[in-house]
Image (spheres, rainbow, N blue to C red):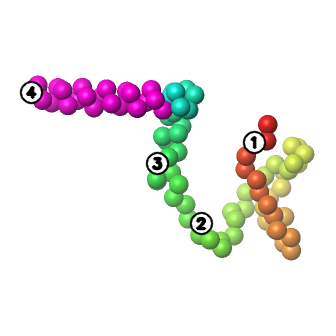
Amino acid sequence: MTLFWKWTIGVALALFLVAFIGLSLMAGSPKDAYGMVRYALPHMHRGKLKVGDDAPDVRLVALNGSDHFHIRERTGAKPLVLVFGSFT
């Protein structure tokens, strides 16, 4: 291996390490940095739903925390609003 390739590989590894440490500091931990990179990849966000499509029929937990229901049971004359997030 020539000196050029040794330096090129060394610099690339150093840049990768600096970027990973920077992301870890911004995200809070190396695990969170890995999660940020993993979910930012474009192929992770591709789905088959289009605007105007019906929502998939999934089983959800009601606001009381113990009851479960399917989306199809609640869709009818009234709109159904799903909020995904944390309110802590």
If the image is split into quadrants, where does the C terminus sit?
A: top right
Q: Is residue 5 left or right of residue 29?
A: left
| Disc 3 target residue | 41
In percent of the image, x 77 and y 57: which residue is there? 82
Q: Residues within 10 Å of mark 3 (few under 14, many from 20)?
A: few
- Sequence-wise, the earlier of marks 3 and 2 is 3
| Disc 2 target residue | 49
- Sequence-wise, the earlier of marks 3 and 1 is 3
Instruction: Identify which amino acid the numbered label 3 is placed on.
Output: Leu
| Disc 1 target residue | 86
Corner quadrant of residue 78: bottom right
| Disc 4 target residue | 2
The span from disc 4 to disc 2 (Cα, nearest Å) is 51 Å
Range of the magenta residues?
1-23
Residue 7 on image: x %, y %: 18, 26
- Sequence-wise, the earlier of marks 3 and 4 is 4
The span from disc 3 to disc 2 (Cα, nearest Å) is 18 Å
State yes or no: discs 4 and 2 in contact (Cβ < 8 Å).
no
Helix, strand or loop at disc 1? loop
- Sequence-wise, the earlier of marks 1 and 4 is 4
If the image is split into quadrants, where does the N terminus sit?
A: top left
Instruction: Identify which amino acid the numbered label 2 is placed on.
Output: Leu
In percent of the image, x 22 and y 29: which residue is there? 9
